[in-house]
Image (spheres, helix red, strand yellow):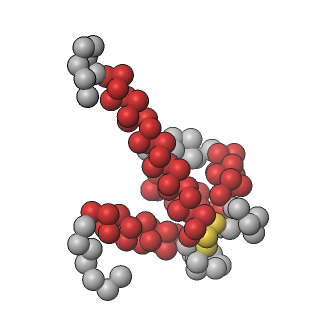
Amino acid sequence: MSREPSSDLESAMQMLIKTFHKYSGKEGDKYTLNRGELKELLLEELGTYLGNSKDNEAVEKVMNDLDANNDGEVDFTEFIILMGALTVACNDFFLEFKTDDKPKGQSS
């Protein structure tokens, strides 16, 4: 990441990487998120989208769903799966909202 991003998508990719590493390795392996690090990331970075992230059961469910290799930690690949799933869910929600919000008789 030695140069400035030249597009919004490059900026978004850099932000995902920086955000993951902001929380990873505070306790243990610097390339993974343990339960505490994941909970902190969810609360600080996704609190608006994951309203129930303060709930320990919700964090456990997210952790168990993401931890594909069952090592008790979330690596960057597993983290990106979460971000992709959340992005798809948000896109679907906003597409549905936009469709529902259109006045009758108007086309897209």
Numbered disc total: 0
The structure residue drawn at horizontal position 32% and vertical position 63%, both measured from the top left corner, is: 9
Determine whether, in the image, residue 72 is placed left or right of residue 49: right
Q: Is residue 28 above or below residue 40?
A: below
What percent of the width, then of the height, locates residue 3? 27, 83
| Residue 37 can be seen, yes or no | no
What percent of the width, then of the height, locates residue 8? 27, 63
Quadrant of residue 35 within the rendered picture: bottom right
Determine whether, in the image, residue 67 is placed left or right of residue 18: right
Tell which residue pokes out farthest to the front in this image. 107
Tell which residue pokes out farthest to the right in this image. 70
Quadrant including the N terminus: bottom left
| Residue 30 can be seen, yes or no | yes
Nearer the observer, 53 or 10: 10
Nearer the observer, 103 or 44: 103
Q: In this view, does 8 lie above or below 51?
A: below
Quadrant of residue 36 within the rendered picture: bottom right
The structure residue drawn at horizontal position 33% and vertical position 29%, both measured from the top left corner, is: 98
Determine whether, in the image, residue 75 is placed left or right of residue 42: right
Determine whether, in the image, residue 19 is placed left or right of residue 60: left
The structure residue drawn at horizontal position 43% and vertical position 66%, both measured from the top left corner, is: 16
What percent of the width, then of the height, locates residue 24? 55, 72
Q: In this view, does 95 lie above or below 78?
A: above
Quadrant including the C terminus: top left
Tell which residue pokes out farthest to the top in this image. 104
Nearer the observer, 78 or 34: 78
The structure residue drawn at horizontal position 42% and vertical position 72%, both measured from the top left corner, is: 18
